[in-house]
């Protein structure tokens, strides 16, 4: 067939297909519903205030969120505690014959570091660490190296630290002299050559002569966010900043509770120099270095201008360990009071002084404290008495604090705290997109009163038969697809319409190291490996919702079936933000009609759309990202086509207002 004949045939087939699609579309009920329906927004008066804390972040040590993630440390098992029997992630270097490695429990650095690594090295032999699925090596970059070392009598006095490619390429090296038979701290910088970034690398410490030496607490950090000495990874912090978060809920989650009371987040053991932190077994199957300790959480808040929402351990752990209310619980209540004093106390207080000694004399602003996490798992109903004990002690000492119950109205009424009225109820929602759509109106029927709602964990997953905690979810991509982003957007419109009630909300979990075996849960908002990172479609959706939020909620008077809407306004400027989600499979024409305001509006539209399965990944980080277009000026009705499967954020400026 001639090329021109083939083209003509193709065109005819395409016309036929369109004709059939048109007939089918016209005969479907959705098509009739989409004949220029109206989205009515009453801009005459605000329905409610949007809480300034509406959008926030929730994190915990899950999916290698801190160690092997946000925390910039690149050495895995830096204290040799991760496995009792062998120095996992460490190996003899440059070959297995170069040295013998022994876990030594004698003469360790201090009580927090019970094990040191003994290296019996050949000349130029030593030990290497393989990092968290590789060590990120950037060109012309300064790495801060810090470790403790000692040598046998007559043993090596000079060591070298190196970043070396898996293929043997030397990326950078520094010599360290002065090693002797007592423990000494060594701090130095290593600058890499002008190389192509790679994570196929190791960090090695070798000896200039044969002999035995010991290592403890080996730390290597590339440049951190704001150059904090024990700081966070820059690319991930930038992504978190892009979410425009107003608060940080920490330290968990299950990570707060631990699997047992013994392995809870013991904040007092997370303070001070890293060599004084023993680390602990987390509930998600791996040990935490506790490099991100209580002060690092607070500095992270300071760096991203977020308000801390501190959760205190309330006597219940995920595998059922429970501390009874009464005398048994008293030390835990005292621990929470000490913790609040550490965060907020002046330097004249015991724990305020400790904070100052740790490098931060100024107290942090704290208004919300959560008592426990998901205590509805404790079916004995003991939370009620435990809550009362915490409530009474905290309110007595810190009367201005608002206390959050970890059991919200989505749980059975008989579990809810009833002897005191918690200021805030924390509700968690991990639902499929369909379930979020079905329940999108649930908050409209909530009783308004003197209790705030904190949606402290929520996220949409694509398939109700594969829940985030199911093992089967681990074989799916660790971050969500467009279908889940639709569910997330629908849920956010629901929360925004009810932002008078829902003062705070945060997606969870936030971060996942995408290497096989690194994650325990999906979906997660942001994925990364040692070198690269990317945002899921939900990441971009949340960033837009949080950026364009305003401070007033406007009433939605009408909306077409299948479309989810919320509208807010910035009272100072009059700029109106409209979020419209069309989660159906059909494009829909709609008129956005503003009532109660006069004049002309100009504006722009940010749209995220794609097939249900469309998603982002390390290799394709920007397949689904917002597309921006400007809108024609309008005074009464803004005519729009809402693309099928699309999330739309409209920024509508009254003609004189600044954006
Ligand atoms: O976000 C993951 C887990 O989900 C949290 O640790 C826990 O609070 C919830 O069950």
Image (cartoon, rainbow, N blue to C red):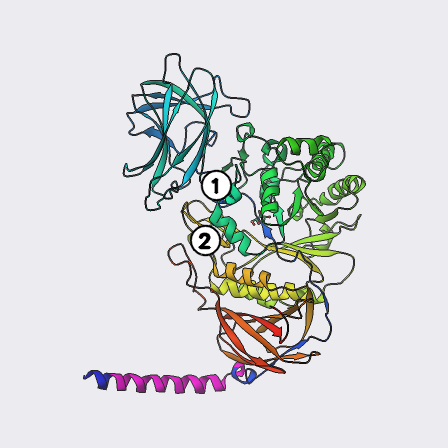
Whether residue 432 is visible to the viewer of this picture, yes or no, is no
> As rendered, which of 296 and 439 lies closer to the eye?
296
Q: CA distance from mark 1 to mark 2?
A: 21 Å
Within 8 Å of ligand 1, the CB of disc 2?
A: no
Q: Secondary structure at mark 1?
A: loop
Q: Identify the residue at image location x=70%, y=56%.
A: 453
Q: Identify the residue at image location x=73%, y=36%.
A: 346
Whether residue 42 is visible to the viewer of this picture, yes or no, is yes
Query: Label 2 crowding class (10 Å Cα cut-off): few <14, some 14-19, many 20+?
Result: many
Q: In the picture provided, is 372 more to the left or to the right than 25?
A: right
Q: Which mark is residue 478?
A: 2
In the picture, residue 6 is in which quadrant? bottom left
- Residue 246, given in percent of the width and then of the height, sits at 63, 53
Query: Label 1 crowding class (10 Å Cα cut-off): few <14, some 14-19, many 20+?
Result: many
> As rendered, which of 539 and 424 lies closer to the eye?
539
Q: Secondary structure at mark 2?
A: loop
Cβ atoms under marks 1 and 2 closer than 8 Å: no
Q: In the picture provided, is 55 more to the left or to the right than 619?
A: right
> As rendered, which of 32 and 350 lies closer to the eye?
350
Look at the image and say whether residue 265 sits in the magenta stretch.
no
**Image quarter (top left, top right, bottom left or bottom right) of the N terminus:** bottom left
What residue is disc 1 on? 72
Magenta span: chief secondary structure: helix
Q: Which residue ends up furthest to the left in the rendered image?
A: 1
Look at the image and say whether residue 22 sits in the magenta stretch.
yes
What span is in magenta? 7-30
Q: Identify the residue at image location x=29%, y=83%.
A: 10
Q: Nearer the viewer, mark 1 or mark 2?
A: 1
Whichever of callouts 1 and 2 sits on the residue coming sooner in the sequence is 1
- Residue 450, given in percent of the width and then of the height, sits at 78, 57
- Residue 133, given in percent of the width and then of the height, sits at 39, 42
Within 8 Å of ligand 1, the CB of disc 1?
A: no
């Amino acid at each position: 067939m001639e090329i021109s004949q083939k083209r003509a045939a193709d065109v005819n087939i395409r016309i036929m297909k369109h004709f059939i699609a048109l007939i089918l579309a016209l005969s479907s009920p959705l098509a009739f519903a989409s004949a220029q329906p109206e989205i009515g927004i009453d801009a005459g008066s605000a329905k409610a205030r949007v809480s300034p804390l509406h959008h926030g972040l929730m994190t915990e040590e899950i999916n290698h969120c801190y160690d092997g993630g946000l925390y910039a440390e690149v050495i895995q098992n830096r204290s040799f505690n991760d496995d009792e029997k062998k120095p996992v992630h460490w190996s003899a270097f440059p070959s297995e014959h170069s040295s013998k490695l022994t876990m030594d429990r004698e003469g360790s650095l201090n009580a927090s570091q019970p094990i040191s690594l003994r290296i019996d090295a050949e000349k130029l032999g030593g030990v290497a660490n393989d990092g968290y699925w590789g060590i990120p090596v950037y060109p012309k970059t300064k790495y801060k190296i810090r470790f403790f070392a000692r040598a046998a009598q007559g043993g090596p006095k000079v060591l070298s630290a190196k970043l070396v490619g898996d293929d043997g390429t030397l990326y950078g090296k520094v010599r360290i002299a002065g090693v002797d038979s007592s423990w000494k701290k060594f701090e130095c910088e290593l600058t890499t050559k002008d190389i192509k970034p790679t994570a196929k690398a190791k960090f090695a410490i070798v000896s200039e002569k044969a002999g035995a030496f010991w290592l403890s607490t080996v730390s290597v950090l590339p440049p951190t966010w704001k150059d904090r000495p024990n700081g966070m990874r820059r690319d991930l912090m930038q992504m978190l900043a892009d979410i425009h978060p107003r608060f940080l809920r920490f330290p968990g989650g299950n990570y707060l509770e631990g699997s047992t009371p013994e392995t809870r987040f013991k904040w007092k053991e997370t303070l001070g120099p890293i060599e004084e932190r023993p680390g602990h077994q987390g509930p998600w199957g791996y040990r935490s270095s506790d490099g991100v300790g209580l002060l690092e959480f607070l500095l992270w808040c300071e760096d991203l201008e977020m308000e801390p929402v501190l959760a205190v351990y309330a006597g219940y752990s995920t595998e059922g360990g429970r501390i009874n209310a009464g005398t048994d619980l008293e030390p835990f209540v005292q621990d929470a009071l000490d913790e609040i004093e550490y965060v907020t106390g002046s330097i004249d207080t015991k724990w305020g002084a400790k904070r100052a000694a740790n490098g931060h004399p100024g107290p942090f602003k704290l208004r919300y404290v959560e008592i426990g996490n998901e205590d509805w798992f404790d079916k004995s109903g003991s939370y009620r008495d435990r809550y009362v004990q915490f409530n009474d002690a905290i309110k007595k000492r810190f009367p201005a604090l608002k206390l959050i119950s970890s059991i919200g109205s989505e749980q059975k009424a008989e579990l809810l705290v009833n002897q005191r009225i918690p200021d805030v109820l924390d509700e968690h929602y991990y639902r499929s997109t369909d379930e979020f759509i079905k329940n999108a109106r649930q908050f409209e029927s909530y009783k308004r009163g003197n209790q705030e709602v904190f949606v402290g964990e929520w996220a949409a997953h694509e398939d109700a038969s594969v829940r985030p905690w199911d093992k089967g979810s681990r074989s799916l991509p660790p971050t969500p697809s467009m279908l889940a982003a639709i569910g997330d957007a629908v849920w956010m419109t629901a929360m925004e319409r009810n932002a008078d009630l829902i003062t705070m909300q945060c997606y969870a979990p936030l971060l996942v190291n995408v290497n096989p075996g690194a994650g325990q849960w999906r979906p997660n908002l942001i994925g990364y490996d040692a070198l690269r990172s990317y945002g899921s479609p939900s990441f971009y959706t949340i960033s837009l919702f949080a950026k364009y939020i305003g401070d007033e909620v406007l009433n939605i008077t009408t909306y077409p079936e299948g479309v989810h809407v919320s509208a807010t306004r910035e009272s100072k400027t009059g700029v109106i933000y409209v979020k419209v989600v069309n989660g159906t499979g059909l494009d829909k024409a709609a008129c956005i009609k503003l009532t109660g305001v006069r004049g002309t509006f100009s504006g722009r539209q940010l749209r995220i759309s794609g097939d249900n399965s469309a998603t982002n990944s390390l290799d394709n980080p920007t397949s689904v990202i917002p597309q921006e277009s400007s809108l024609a000026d309008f005074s009464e009705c803004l005519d729009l086509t809402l693309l099928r499967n699309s999330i739309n954020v409209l920024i509508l400026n009254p003609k004189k207002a600044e954006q």
